[in-house]
């Protein structure tokens, strides 16, 4: 597993139904999270629909006034 820098934070979002998980994904997108993996289904889990998301931080603008995603 690769080490993540201070600017990265990963989470596994879970849902009982596909629709419930999609709502969670939309809610987390408002806070800068993006999908990193495909949606997976784990039959034996109480919340079988799962996806990995990662927080993406916007860097401060540099001297050329162009923002970049770190």
Image: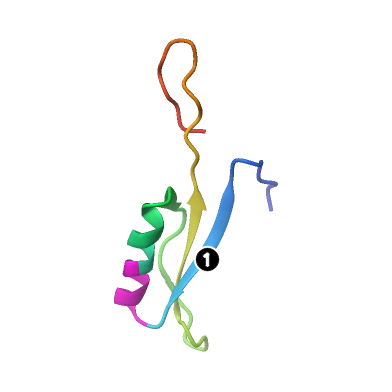
Q: What element carries label 1?
A: strand
**Residue occupied by mark 1:** 12
Figure coloring: rainbow
Total tally of numbered discs in the picture: 1
Q: Position of residue 44 (x, y in %)?
A: 52, 89
Residue 48 part of the magenta segment: no
Query: For this view, does 2 lie left or right of residue 52?
Result: right
Residue 18: x and y, percent? 33, 76
User: In this rendering, would 53 be left or right of 6?
Assistant: left
Q: Which residue is drawn at 59% across and 45% down?
A: 8
> Picture coordinates of residue 36 (x, y %)?
47, 53
Q: In this view, does 23 lie above or below 66?
A: below
Magenta stretch bounds: 17-23
Say above or below: 58 vs 2. above
Front one among 33 and 38: 33
Examine the rendered structure and indicate whether residue 63 appears above or below residue 59: above
Residue at screen point 52% across, 33% down: 70
Quarter of the image holding residue 20?
bottom left
């Amino acid at each position: 597993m690769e080490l993540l820098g201070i600017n990265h934070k990963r989470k596994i979002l879970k849902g009982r139904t596909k629709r419930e998980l999609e709502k969670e994904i939309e809610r987390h997108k408002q806070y800068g999270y993006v999908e990193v993996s495909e949606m997976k289904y784990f039959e034996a889990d109480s919340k079988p629909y799962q996806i990995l998301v990662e927080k993406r931080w916007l860097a401060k603008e540099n001297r050329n006034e162009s923002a970049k995603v770190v």
